[in-house]
Image (cartoon, rainbow, N blue to C red):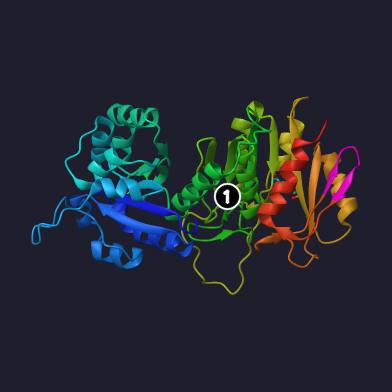
Amino acid sequence: MHGKRILLGITGGIAAYKIAFLVRILKKKGAEVKCIMTPASSDFISPLVLATLSENPVGIEFWDKKTGVWTNHVDYGLWADVFVVAPLTANSLAKMATGSCDNLLLATYLSMKCPTIIAPAMDLDMYAHPSTKRNLNQLLADGVHLIPAEAGELASGLVGEGRMAEPETIAAAIEHFFLSQNSKANLSLKGKKVLVTAGPTYESIDPVRFIGNHSSGKMGFSIAEQLLAEGAEVELISGPTKLGLAHPNLTITRINSAQEMLEAVQSKWSDMNIGIFSAAVADYRPMEMAVQKIKKSENELTIELVKNPDILAWAGTNKAENQLLVGFALETNNVLENATSKLKRKNLDMIVMNTLEDKGAGFSGDTNKISILDIHNKLTSFELKSKSEVAKDIVAYLINYHK
Ligand code: C5P
């Protein structure tokens, strides 16, 4: 994003406080950032914070009441490479959809020469309201790019869809937007539906504790990104990770436990052309989750574990003739032997092997060293690479693979 000019528009919702983090992320990635705000949004975040972090003055009013100096919304429109409105409230959304311009931010939107990306944020009832849907559809028809609101806890205390996407997700969407503008469209997977599992699973012990692992989700998210770049429609089912990704052809389902991941996979698998299972699913879960936090009264505590469902094996058993299934194998010994048996046992078309013995390979780091073994017994080994390069290799292998 080096040197890219990003104009951030902030409207008056509680999520406005998160924009300070977004500004920091974008600046760290080398972008130039300017902020414009609706007057109401300055009740949620101080313009001083945004001016300091963005290293640019913040625009709020059409003109300065003390000096009479006019803020030129047309100049903002000419300056920016992309205009990102986050959070976008129901009120400003409605005004953008109808072309109303009673503040600087809205006038700037009407003067924009570059694409606009929006990240709505509102309470669930407002987000679900037919008029909000109508306004959103209108903006999409006008060519605006949407970073959908996510489901989760809302400031009102309600739980549902309406939370602004996290700053990391918005930054990733902006980055993706610039990448897709630059790269020539090479759409080898256009029309293909691909399911990807990613990240760890958390198996609850009690309301505050869980069994988990160090999987970062980076491998799965990088694979999703490469698939999207090749034109695929991606269903990403992810365990808890800090990662975010936004794209019009991407749906992310966030789950916690293996059981939830299985249910998500079961509801989508029959519709898919390809499945890539990179999640580090916990093999066991506590037999029962304690309803209350377990007290440390005894010297010893025994937690009885039961086996989790093997999600990949379920997909293998329920694989149609034309579906392609890819699994991962993280082995510490007898890598090839174990991977070969896994490939057959789980009815896979190929298996991506990595071993913790290779320095730099595996779980939570940024690099990985893989080999791919397919059902025709072809073994291809790759060098140690960044996870996004590894993802490119895997996706390229898939594109050239013949069943
Ligand atoms: O059997 P193992 O856990 O080594 O297999 C690893 C592969 O199986 C990975 O692709 C992983 O995503 C998948 N898996 C799964 N559900 C499980 C365990 C593993 O989908 N419960």
In magenta segment, residue 159: no
Please report the residue visible at 64 percent of the width from the left and 37 percent of the height from the top: 230
Whole-percent x, y for residue 304 in the image: 65, 57
Picture quadrant of residue 123: top left
Q: Tag count in the figure?
A: 1
Please report the residue visible at 35 percent of the width from the left and 61 percent of the height from the top: 20
Instruction: Choose between 41 and 122: the one closer to the eye.
Output: 41
Please report the residue visible at 63 percent of the width from the left and 50 percent of the height from the top: 222
Whole-percent x, y for residue 279 in the image: 66, 49
In magenta segment, residue 377: yes
Whole-percent x, y for residue 402 in the image: 82, 31
Instruction: Choose between 251 and 270: the one closer to the eye.
Output: 251
What residue occupies the far left of the structure in this picture? 66
Instruction: Choose between 203 and 56: the one closer to the eye.
Output: 56
Question: Is residue 312 among the parts visible in the rendering?
Answer: yes
Instruction: State whether residue 69 is above or below residue 309.
Output: below
Question: Magenta region: which residues?
Answer: 372-380
Q: Amino acid at mark 1?
A: Gly
In the picture of the structure, the residue carrying the numbered disc 1 is 239
